[in-house]
Amino acid sequence: MSRIADIKSVDDFVPVGCKECRNKEALGLDFSMAFQPIVDIETHGVFGYEALVRGLNNEAAYTVLEQLNDNNRYRFDQTIRVKAIDLASSLGLQGMLSINFLPNAVYKPETCIRATLEAASEMGFPTERIMFEVTEGEKVTDHAHLHGIFAEYKKHNFTTAIDDFGAGYAGLNLLADWQPDVIKLDMALTRNIDKDRVRRSLVFAILTACRELEIKVIAEGIESREECLILAEQGVRLFQGYYFAKPGFETLPEIPEEIWSTLV
């Protein structure tokens, strides 16, 4: 069973629309977002941006997440999506918008996606440019429930992804049960990969599996040219990390031109 079913009955979760999700008083807390680029080293361009929760004054995500409880988790999950689409639209974001969501807060996928669809329609943001990430670090015991969530999202042309792959609870078991469009290699695997034979062996095996399963790979946590290049040699073209740009609070950071020259 998913954790949300253990908290309340489904009848206690009233579907909300995008207008209700903008009501910070109803949520009981307020927050904003930073955006970190995901780059494509083949095109020397930005593939998209990940929306990251922040406090109103750019405080770290944990200052917001520590305020979550069983009573506001569902509405917070809905509000994240609407807030991300609102901010991305106002900033003129081009490419993919990546949004983290809480699978344990989704009780019925076709109902819980309503606010997202309304916000996307209202802001003129195509659903095929929205990627939903579930972090492997969030313990999901009901894989069938998660599969159902992503199956519903695919009906609406959303891209699906596993975030922090290789650092959480399920690992390859999660990938064996269902195949997302994208996996994001956790920084614990990519950090110093150019110097670490064990990490290279593990990551290269994951990349081989992803090629066979036609799953795109984003390498997270990249902090050096060497980390980037050794993964690029294995066919990875999408990267995210401080080497390219730090998250920008309520802004869309650009990639310095000198970065591209180091990768030629």
Image (tube, grey):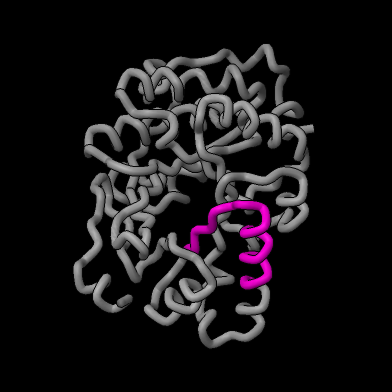
Give percent across and percent down for residue 94.
Answer: 28, 42
Q: Which residues are magenta?
A: 203-220
Using the image as rendered, state which of residue 70 and residue 163 is in the foreground: 163
Q: Is residue 112 visible?
A: yes
The residue under the point 43% across, 36% down is 130
* Residue in view at x 70 percent, y 47 percent: 139
Task: Assess whether residue 25 is covered by the magenta stretch.
Answer: no
Judged left or right of residue 245, residue 5 is right
Q: Position of residue 88 (x, y in %)?
A: 30, 37
Q: Quadrant of the N terminus?
A: top right
What percent of the width, then of the height, locates residue 77? 51, 32
Q: Is residue 211 magenta?
A: yes
Q: Give residue 121's quadrant in the image.
A: top left
Q: Is residue 31 above or below residue 218?
A: above
Question: What residue is shown at x 62% (from left), y 24% (from top)?
Answer: 109
Q: Can residue 23 be seen in the rendering of this structure? A: no
In screen coordinates, is 71 left or right of 114? right
Identify the image quadrant of residue 12: top right
Q: Is residue 164 left or right of residue 107?
A: left
Q: Image height check: is 158 above or below 55?
A: above
Q: Magenta span: helix, strand or loop, mainly?
A: helix
Q: Position of residue 123 (x, y in %)?
A: 30, 23
Residue 68 placement: quadrant: top right
**Outermost residue toward the left in this view:** 257
Q: Quadrant of the C terminus?
A: bottom left
